Image (spheres, helix red, strand yellow):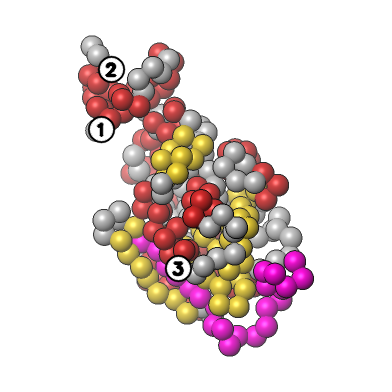
Amino acid sequence: MDLVGRLRAAGCVFAEEEAELLAGATEEMIARRIAGEPLETVLGWAAFAGIRVACRPGVFVPRVRSELLVRLAMTAMPRRVLDLGCGTGALGAAVAARVPEVEVWAVDVDPAAVACARLNLPAERVLEGDLFEPLPAMAFDVILANAPYVPTEEIALMPSEARDHEHRVALDGGADGLALQRRLIAQAPGWLAEGGVLLVESSRRQAPATRRLMADAGLVADVVTDEEIAGTAVRGQVRRSSTPHRWTTFGEGT
């Protein structure tokens, strides 16, 4: 059986396209893909928002729907950006590709994700730890967060590529999928510059609850969707007339 047939028999929907990408791959790589490992970690890279991002086994593979966060970040004309719960660092890397002078920081609690993100972003600005804890004092124009939002009981319903091959910490959002979002949204205003924007990926079902969390945190919030890529994001902005920030803004004493 040729490679296309083997991939199709293994359940790969886009067998022809995958066969082209795997042309010249070792038999070990092909066997990993047939066994269900994500194509991106088999190849070692993913195409995302017009760039190629290094991917490693176990790390959350960037999804096309997350490109909505990148586009929304661009509207804020950011100078300093935080990719929070960064995984591969794809969001931050895509912003940096569009704004070469931007200063991108990234944080993840998973050591494997941190090691991978350091391949895609300046290594010294990719930190390991829980949410904002490892960061030095600073303020961000944009905080991007694709925090896990799958309810615990629904992980079993996810495709096996995610369920069996991505680390649980990158998927599990707690009982209602909002456990980590609650924590990061509550803390985020203290890390945003005046007029700064928090962008959080969500599902359509959960987006209203995420918007309420942002409003409760004092942010001006709305929900943005992109039907073409099935993307949903909740955007929260610091009111420009708010109390002065606890940190200096970018370019002021930094």
Q: Is residue 133 above or below residue 166?
A: below
Q: Amino acid at mark 2?
A: Leu
Q: Measuring 40% from the left and 63% from the top, which residue is drawn there?
A: 233
Quadrant that contains the N terminus: top left
Magenta residue check for 245: yes
The image shows residue 71 at horizontal and vertical percentages of: 41, 60
**In the image, 183: left or right of 66?**
right
> How many angstroms separate mark 3 from mark 2 (CA)?
43 Å
Q: Measuring 60% from the left and 49% from the top, which residue is drawn there?
A: 108
Q: Are marks 3 and 2 in contact (CB under 8 Å)?
A: no
Quadrant that contains the C terminus: bottom right
Q: Amino acid at mark 3?
A: Thr
Residue 224 placement: quadrant: bottom left
Q: Is residue 182 visible?
A: no
**In the image, 15: left or right of 208?**
left
The image shows residue 81 at horizontal and vertical percentages of: 58, 61
> How many angstroms separate mark 1 from mark 3 (CA)?
34 Å
State which tag comes first along the sequence, 1 or 2.
2
Q: Which residue is mark 2?
A: 3
Crowdedness near tag 3: few (<14), some (14–19) or many (≥20) residues, C-alpha within 10 Å: few
Crowdedness near tag 1: few (<14), some (14–19) or many (≥20) residues, C-alpha within 10 Å: few
Q: Main secondary structure of the magenta part?
A: loop
Residue 40 placement: quadrant: top left
* Label 2 residue SS: helix
Q: Which residue is mark 3?
A: 75
* Label 3 residue SS: loop
Give, as a single range, the part of the protein colored magenta: 232-254
